[in-house]
Image (tube, helix red, strand yellow):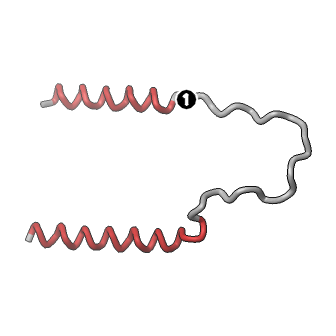
Amino acid sequence: MNYINKILLFAFLTVGAFLSAQTGPPAPPGGGGGGVGPGAPASPIDAYIYVLGIVAVLFIAYYAKRASKKLA
């Protein structure tokens, strides 16, 4: 069992190292005035961040309560 744990740990660390060893994005081209303004929003869900957080907490509470009922 200990041998399997060591193999799995090595595999996960190796895969993690390969996934995080990516190159960065290319530099933007220089020059040009560009448009004026803030540009596109960071993400389309900015207005609903608080709602998503509340829903996440409710899901966690629901599944925790359901799991505790199964154990009892």
Q: Residue at x 33, y 70 (%)?
A: 59
Q: Where does residue 53 sit, x and y in percent of width and height?
A: 46, 69
How many labels were placed on the picture?
A: 1
Name the side, left or right, on which 69 lies relative to 35: left
Q: Judge by depth and name the residue closer to the eye, 3 or 27.
A: 27
Left or right: residue 3 versus residue 21 is left
Q: Quarter-wise, where is residue 36 in the image?
A: bottom right
| Residue 29 in picture, x, y percent from top left | 81, 33
70 shown above or below 5: below
What's under tag 1, amino acid-wise? Gln
Asked whether, in this view, residue 24 is left or right of residue 70, the answer is: right
Q: What quarter of the picture does the N terminus occupy?
A: top left
Classed neighbour count for the residue bearing mark 1: other residues with Cα under 10 Å, few (<14), some (14–19), many (≥20): few
**Image location (x, y in percent) of residue 58:** 35, 74
Q: Is residue 35 above or below residue 17?
A: below
Q: Which residue is mark 1?
A: 22
Q: Residue at x 25, y 68 (%)?
A: 63
Q: Quadrant of residue 13?
A: top left
Q: Which residue is at a point 90% across and 40% down the rendered structure image?
A: 32
Give the quadrant of the C terminus: bottom left
Query: Which secondary structure, mark 1?
Result: loop
Q: Residue furthest left?
A: 72
Q: Residue at x 18, y 28 (%)?
A: 4
Task: Name the spot of residue 62 as percent of width and height, x first.
Answer: 27, 73
